[in-house]
């Protein structure tokens, strides 16, 4: 006879990535009984590696408010290095963008017209980090296990019934289990485990962005700063070393990320507009990777000696990344934001949005658990997440439309940086989430973004490149639109696309 393990939980969490593990720790701190379920096993390869100042602030606030002192050092590079020197991460001082033209080596332009650097910290000590997710996720899972939270690994859920309360049955490590839980949280990311059982419709056509990816982890990737100096670009003019950042190589119809970790490994991947560059069945992932490198001589030189080290099985290639579930929460269940949708890695919004969603869900559970207004609070959460998905999609899709003309890209990207910096400053001042995640619920910012997005779509229709006069007019329009939210000195022509980190009041 097969023995069945039985569990009773207040909240069962599906998915033991960093979001699921952190959620389990927080729920325990509320005095409730969490249980964590993972289909795979740790450590494991995963993307979603870049933090931002907003992500750091939310993580720090959660650790302080809910008494997780071992998590708190992960919120900044300096404290991370002091507390956990053997836990690998990468230094991220900001965002670096370089525009390339097919067939030509990269060369600096006057006034740095094919470069954009935006700092996100004053120094390395208070900088953001790149998370080597195999280690980062495993560390947080270790905290879950040390806290005595039940954890089921290599779990296959065969049935979810009820709702609420729920009964989940299946196998873990070959042993049968049965879980009774009052509430479910889906933190499985692209797995979207709960959506399959609840028949929550996937509506990718609601997303404007239409991109796919080819990616992996490499050793021996040359530092871009060295190549800039060889090309005659003065590195002393940079507000930070461009490699200590989320480095972006941009081209017409796509871009590449390059994220460096402290152990010599570099995460890199091409993100391609699938409408412009659909996958060719005649090319496998390695052949397509090599073909894209060959288009851009300087990037090819950067990766000339690179060796793939992860994931197991070689380079990974996706179909269209974008998904969007019709609901993010309802009676008895909720999803973390990046389970409810998949967007794109541009601007590194995913981890910050996950943490923002965790913060809101924990507050809802803390304030409304077993209260009559709990369902209404979940409905508010669903509406907020859906509005944020549309907002982020517009920010990213507009940048994709402008990839062919870097000046348009650099101008439209200022909406993201204005929103990010405003939210950071408001949180630091105690205003917390005024305006929602990246100002998604700020009516004035939304109206300005909508108008600039509409104008950008017109400028990038199939009618040839925008003229210099049109570009200058668009730059002025963006500068005026973000002025009420511009606390970082953005859109200043005198800075030549180099923006140091600015803190309001100093």
Image (cartoon, grey):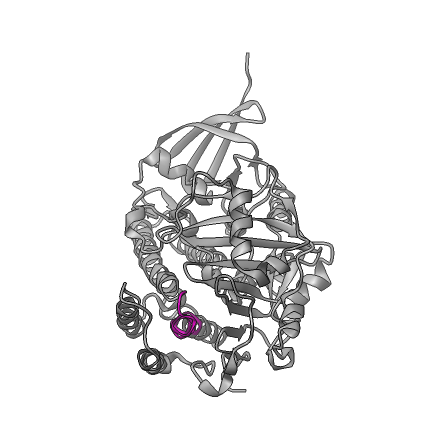
Q: Going by the picture, which residue comes out furthest to the top? A: 1
Q: Quadrant of the C terminus?
A: bottom right
Q: Going by the picture, which residue comes out furthest to the front? A: 103
| Left/right of residue 181 with respect to residue 303 in the rendered view | left
Span shown in magenta: 403-417
Residue 313 appears at what percent x and percent y? 59, 37
The answer to which of 406 and 239 lies nearer the viewer is 406
Q: Does residue 334 show up?
A: yes
Residue at 51 percent of width and 83 percent of height: 111
432 versus 336 height, above or below: below
| Left/right of residue 412 with respect to residue 289 in the rendered view | left
Q: Magenta region, mostly helix, strand or loop?
A: helix
| Left/right of residue 147 with respect to residue 275 in the rendered view | right
The answer to which of 17 and 114 lies nearer the viewer is 114
Q: Is residue 275 magenta?
A: no
Residue at 51 percent of width and 48 percent of height: 214
365 versus 440 height, above or below: above
Residue 355 appears at what percent x and percent y? 48, 57
348 versus 159 height, above or below: below
492 versus 108 height, above or below: below
Residue 328 appears at what percent x and percent y? 34, 48
Residue at 45 percent of width and 70 percent of height: 420
Residue at 65 percent of width and 55 percent of height: 304
Q: Quadrant of the N terminus?
A: top right
The answer to which of 134 and 18 lies nearer the viewer is 134
Residue 331 appears at what percent x and percent y? 31, 43
Q: Does residue 16 show up?
A: no
Q: Is residue 406 magenta?
A: yes
| Left/right of residue 430 with respect to residue 132 in the rendered view | left
Query: Image quadrant of residue 402?
Result: bottom left
């Amino acid at each position: 006879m097969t023995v069945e393990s039985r569990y009773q939980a207040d909240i069962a969490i599906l998915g033991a990535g960093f979001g699921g593990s952190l959620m389990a720790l927080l729920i325990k701190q509320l005095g409730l009984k969490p249980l964590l379920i993972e289909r795979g096993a740790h450590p494991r390869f995963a993307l979603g590696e870049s933090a931002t100042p907003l992500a750091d602030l939310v993580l720090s606030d959660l650790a302080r408010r809910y008494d997780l002192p071992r998590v708190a050092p992960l919120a900044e590079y300096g404290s991370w290095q002091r507390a956990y020197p053997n836990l690998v991460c990468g230094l991220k001082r900001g965002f670096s963008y370089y525009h390339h033209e097919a067939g030509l080596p990269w060369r600096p332009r006057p006034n740095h017209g094919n470069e954009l650097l935006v700092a996100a910290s004053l120094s390395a000590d208070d900088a953001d980090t790149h998370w080597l997710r195999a280690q980062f996720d495993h560390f947080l899972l270790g905290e879950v296990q040390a806290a005595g939270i039940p954890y089921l690994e290599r779990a296959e859920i065969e049935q979810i019934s009820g709702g609420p309360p729920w009964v989940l049955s299946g196998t873990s490590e070959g042993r049968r289990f049965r879980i009774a839980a009052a509430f479910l949280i889906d933190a499985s990311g692209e797995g979207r485990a709960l959506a399959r059982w609840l028949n929550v419709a996937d509506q990718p056509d609601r997303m404007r962005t239409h991109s796919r990816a080819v990616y992996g982890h490499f050793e021996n990737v040359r530092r871009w700063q060295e190549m800039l100096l060889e090309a005659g670009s003065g590195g002393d003019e940079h507000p930070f070393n461009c490699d200590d950042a989320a480095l972006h190589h941009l081209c017409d119809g796509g871009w590449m990320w390059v994220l460096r970790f402290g152990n010599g490994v570099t995460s890199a991947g091409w993100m391609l507009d699938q409408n412009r560059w659909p996958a060719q069945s005649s090319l496998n992932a390695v052949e397509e990777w090599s073909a894209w490198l060959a288009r851009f001589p300087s990037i090819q030189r950067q990766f000339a000696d690179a060796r793939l080290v992860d994931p197991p099985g070689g380079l990974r290639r996706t179909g269209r990344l974008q998904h969007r579930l019709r609901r993010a929460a309802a009676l008895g269940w909720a999803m973390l934001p990046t389970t409810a949708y998949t967007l794109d890695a541009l601007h590194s919004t995913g981890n910050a949005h996950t943490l923002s969603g965790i913060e809101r869900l924990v507050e809802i559970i803390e304030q409304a658990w077993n209260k009559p207004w709990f369902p209404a609070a979940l409905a508010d959460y669903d509406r907020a997440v859906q509005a944020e998905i549309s907002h982020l999609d517009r920010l990213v899709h507009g940048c994709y439309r402008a990839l062919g003309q870097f000046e348009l890209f650099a101008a439209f990207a200022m909406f993201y940086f204005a929103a990010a910096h405003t939210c950071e400053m408001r949180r630091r001042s105690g205003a917390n989430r005024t305006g929602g995640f990246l100002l998604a619920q700020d009516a004035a910012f939304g109206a300005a973004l909508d108008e600039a997005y509409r104008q950008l779509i017109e400028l990038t229709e199939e009618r040839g490149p925008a003229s210099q006069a049109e570009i200058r007019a668009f730059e002025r329009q963006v500068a005026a639109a973000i002025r009420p939210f511009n606390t970082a000195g953005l859109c200043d022509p005198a800075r030549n696309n180099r923006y140091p980190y600015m803190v309001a009041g100093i």
